[in-house]
Amino acid sequence: MDNDGEKIRCKFNELWNNIMSAISIAVNIELPMKTVKYPGSRNIRHKLSFVDKTMRHTTKLGSLMRKISKDQGFIDNKDDKWINFWINRINKYNKDYNRKEYDKFIDNHKELTIPTHDLFSDTWIKNAKEVFKKRIKIDKNYLQAQRLRKIQDSIENRCNIIHSDIPKWLHSTQDNVKEHIIIDRSVISNKNEGIRLALDPNTIRTHAKDTFAGILRKRNTKSIEQDVFWSNIYRLKGEFTECMANLIDEITIGEWHQTLELVNTNSAPGPSGIGYAITGRSGMICMKFIAHK
């Protein structure tokens, strides 16, 4: 009698464990979850969005394609239960892009349908690979559109702030200067003690006051603070000598003709652009004007 009760209890526990396992598997398939880690907190599980689900299905389909292509005998070792599992999965994958959010990225929904007949044959593998490539392209275009939409929303939000709340806009764009700077340690160096780390509040306060006073004080440079060289930089060194005084005399026409004979006829005097060859053939009035200017 005791043995019969023990057998019934074991059978009941086994059935209960099977039921809980089936429920757990069904929940994991129908309600896929992802783990998000936050620093300093426990792991929090969140339900996947439809975009994450679709991309996950595309990844699993690609993984199946790679396994089949890599090992031709991969399918031979699988039983009917595994085949039926993938038939159900494929039927579920074919419903991924029925949402209206994907309509503008899809021209023909039939091209995204994975066939369920002749499963894992060469023809099926070829068609599934084409569907896999199209799914990747659609997922990429959808994510790119979402990013652009977020950027556009951010720009519109910024424009609304500029037009409606200018103080908030200025506060967010300008560098905010802190009114209070906390200094809790300071490195002090001098000839006697070398370099040391000061932690005493009074010492830090004195050192910071002297340092920032020298950096932030208004500069006022006076001529008395200049050295002798810069103080006398604009002072005359002496009178013109005789050879320097001759440079002030006006050029005569004879000297001008002599100059024209020595210079390159292809060059021009100053920025005028008129060559010396033309200048030499000009009239006397023009020569006097050029020579005296």
Image: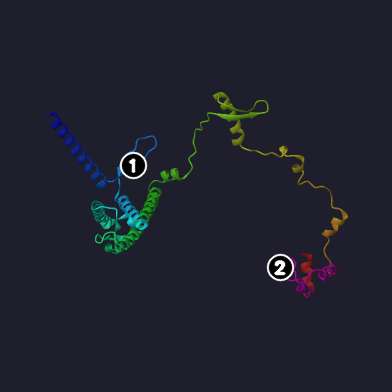
| Side of 246 relative to 135 (left or right) | right
110 to 58, vertically: above or below: below
What is the three-letter code of the residue carrying label 1?
Answer: Thr
137 to 272, vertically: above or below: above
Residue sitting farthest toward the right: 242
| Side of 134 relative to 281 (left or right) | left
Residue drawn at the location 86% of the way across and 53% of the way down: 241
Mark in the foreground, 2 or 1: 1
Q: Which mark is residue 35?
A: 1
> How many numbered discs, if any?
2
Q: Which mark is residue 181?
A: none
| Magenta region, residue range | 254-281
State the image coordinates of residue 154 (x, y, percent, origin top left).
39, 50
Question: 129 and 166: which one is in front?
Answer: 129
Question: Which residue is labeled 2 in the image?
Answer: 272
**Label 2 to label 1: alpha-carbon separation:** 80 Å
286 to 223, vertically: above or below: below
Question: 84 and 103: which one is in front?
Answer: 84
What is the three-letter code of the residue carrying label 2?
Answer: Ser
Dominant SS type (magenta):
helix
Residue drawn at the location 22% of the way across and 43% of the way down: 22
State the image coordinates of residue 150 (x, y, percent, origin top left).
37, 51
- Give the structural element (helix, strand or loop) at label 1: strand
